[in-house]
C-alpha cells in the first residue's frame, strides 16, 4: 500500500506500505475511489476464493463506511444464484482439515484457525473435529463454516453437532450468515475506519 494521498493504482493487497515500515490500510474514501481491479486485489480475500463477491460489491459503491461496505458484500452474496452461493460455501476450508495440515489455507484462514488454537488441538479434539467435518460435509455438501473467533474448541464442537440436526436449507442460511460475520471481521482488518 502507498501512503495516504498516493495514487490508488499503487495499492497492494499485502497490507503494508511499499517501504514495509508499518501497516497502512486504505480509508473508506480511498476504497470508494478504487477501480474494480484494485478493489478486488485488496478486498477480494475477505471471502474465501470468491473474488466475484468483491467485484459485485464494488458495483454498489460508494460505501461511506466499513459497515456499508460489509452490507454491499453481503448483498452480493445474497443476490447470487443458489448454485453460486453453494460454490462460495464449498470454497471454504475444513476447520483443522486437510488444507490446514498441508499448509494450504489462505493467510486469513490460517490466522483465524491459529487464533482459535485449531492448530494445537489435543488428539481427542482433533478426532472429534475430523469426524464432525466428515459428517457435516456428507450431510450438507459443503464444509462446516463458523466464525471461529466467537468460539472455544468446546463450543465449536457442540454447535457443530447441533447444526448437524438442521434442515439443509436452514443450515445453508446459517453457513452464509457465518460467512457474513467472517467477512465483516476481515473487512475491518483490511480497511481503516474514518471518523469525521
Image: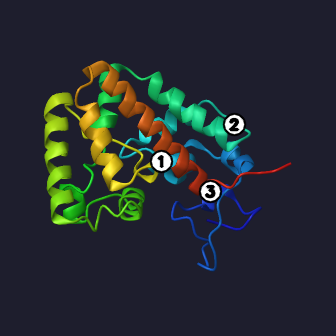
Q: CA distance from mark 1 to mark 3?
A: 20 Å
- Residue at the image point whose x is 64% and y is 47% from the top: 34
Task: Measuring from the top left, give residue 114's x and y in whole percent.
Answer: 37, 65
Tell me the residue that label 2 is attached to.
63
Q: How many numbered discs sit on the rendered protein? A: 3
* Residue 4 lies in quadrant: bottom right
Which residue does the numbered mark 3 point to in the structure image?
A: 9
As rendered, which of 107 and 134 lies closer to the eye?
Answer: 134
Residue 80 image point, x, y percent:
42, 23
Q: CA distance from mark 2 to mark 3?
A: 19 Å
Q: Secondary structure at mark 2?
A: loop
Please, is residue 96 above or below residue 182 in the view?
below
At horizontal 39% and vertical 62% (from top left) the residue drawn is 107
Distance between the Cα atoms at labels 2 and 1?
A: 16 Å
Disc 1 target residue = 46
Q: Position of residue 160 (x, y in %)?
A: 28, 40
- At horizontal 37% and vertical 56% (from top left) the residue drawn is 109
The mark nearer the N terminus, 2 or 1, is 1
* Camera-nearest label, 2 or 3: 2
Dot 3 alpha-carbon crowd within 10 angstroms: few under 14, some 14 to 19, many 20 or more: few
Amino acid at each position: 500500500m502507498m501512503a495516504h494521498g498516493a495514487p490508488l493504482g499503487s495499492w497492494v493487497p499485502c497490507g503494508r506500505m511499499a517501504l514495509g515500515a508499518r501497516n497502512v490500510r486504505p480509508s473508506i474514501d480511498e476504497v470508494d475511489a478504487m477501480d474494480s481491479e484494485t478493489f478486488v486485489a485488496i478486498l477480494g480475500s475477505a471471502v474465501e476464493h470468491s473474488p466475484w463477491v468483491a467485484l459485485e460489491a464494488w458495483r454498489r459503491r460508494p460505501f461511506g463506511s466499513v459497515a456499508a461496505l460489509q452490507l454491499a458484500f453481503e448483498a452480493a452474496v445474497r443476490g447470487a444464484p443458489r448454485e453460486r452461493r453453494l460454490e462460495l460455501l464449498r470454497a471454504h476450508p475444513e476447520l483443522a482439515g486437510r488444507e490446514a495440515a498441508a499448509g494450504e489455507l489462505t493467510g486469513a484462514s490460517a490466522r483465524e484457525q491459529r487464533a482459535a488454537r485449531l492448530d494445537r488441538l489435543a488428539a481427542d479434539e482433533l478426532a472429534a473435529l475430523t469426524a464432525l467435518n466428515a459428517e457435516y460435509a456428507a450431510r450438507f455438501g459443503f464444509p462446516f463454516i463458523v466464525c471461529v473467533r466467537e468460539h472455544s474448541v468446546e463450543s465449536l464442537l457442540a454447535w457443530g453437532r447441533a447444526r448437524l440436526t438442521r434442515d439443509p436449507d436452514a443450515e445453508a442460511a446459517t453457513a452464509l450468515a457465518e460467512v457474513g460475520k467472517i467477512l465483516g471481521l476481515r473487512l475491518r482488518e483490511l480497511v481503516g475506519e474514518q471518523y469525521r
